[in-house]
Image (tube, rainbow, N blue to C red):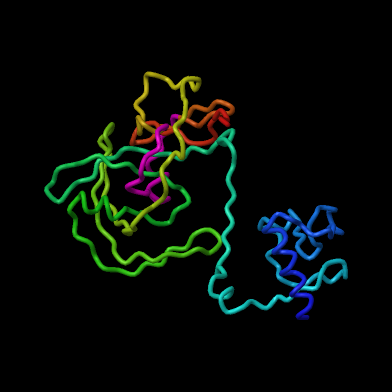
Amino acid sequence: MSSSLNSVLIVCKYILEDTCSKEVCRQCNSRHHTLLHFDKQHQHYDARSVNNNPPTNGKGPSTNNKLTANEQNSAPTEVNTYCTFKGKPQNQVLLATAIVELRKKSGRYIPCRALLDSASQSHFITERCVQRLRLSKTQTHSSIQGIINSSAVANHCVSIHMRSRHTDWHDSLNCAVLSDITGTTPATKLDTSSWGIPTDIKLADENFNLPGDTDLLLGADLFYEMLRSGKRTRPGYPVLQETVLGSTLSGTTPVITSQ
């Protein structure tokens, strides 16, 4: 073993002095010793080689998979993978939003953005919105279950009074308080120039096509109560639905892909 190590050190000395030995690499025919040959394909980390098991087909060099103490300390404890898309989706689903007026503790009303959700069994409000309203919260313990059994807990609820900007409709309801309800809605700015939205209607949310925060989520027990008979559809475009809060737009929207 010592003679082999000495021979490697001698070759290393030759290379450093730029006077390579007469040995020719049997792997690539370059003027260095075969023991110093490294495949280029092994010089970069291959994500596919996360399995440290030795090859079982007998076609690769035998390797020792036990890490040294230093290697174990520097080895990552978790591997995360991320998937992204080039460009934006060709279309997306627009959720119905409305600007409603909520009453503050002082009695004054302020505009807040609500998401209309016919699939929710409860109403929700963000902690941020509660602070704006200066309302007192009631301690509670509500378990919230979502898709694929995802769960969360709301530790407070609050009673709010809400009214429409366009009609005389108003109502009081209890909302579970959450730190956040959803991300910005919609995800990207939508070009509505080709949608042909009528000019003789009052929109529930004039900025429905601009990404914005959600302050309030109104669930199923109010959703259908707020609907009116007026409804306009156009293939490939969102549905225009009349409600007591104004006309909402929801459904598939055409979006041009940008690379």
Classify the position of the N terminus by image quarter: bottom right
**Residue interval drawn in magenta:** 209-230
Q: Is residue 228 magenta?
A: yes
**Residue 79: percent from the left, percent from the top?**
58, 63
Residue at (24% x, 53% y) in the render = 130
Which quadrant holds residue 199? top left
| Residue 62 x/y as whole percent | 80, 73
- In depth, the one of 235 and 88 nearer the eye is 88
Left or right, residue 20 beside residue 101 = right
Residue 227 is left or right of residue 69, and the answer is: left
Q: In which quarter of the view is residue 143 placed?
A: bottom left
In the rendered view, tell whether residue 231 sits above or below residue 31: above
The image shows residue 211, relative to residue 23, as above or below, that is above
Image position, residue 196 (x, y; %): 48, 19
- Residue 52 image offset from top left, x and y in percent: 71, 70
For the point 38% across and 35% down, which residue is it?
Answer: 243
| Image height of 196 relative to 37, above or below | above
- Judging depth in this view, the residue of 31 and 21 nearest the camera is 21
> Closer to the camera, 8 or 224?
8
Residue 169 on the magenta span: no
Quadrant of image for the C terminus: top right
The number of discs equals 0
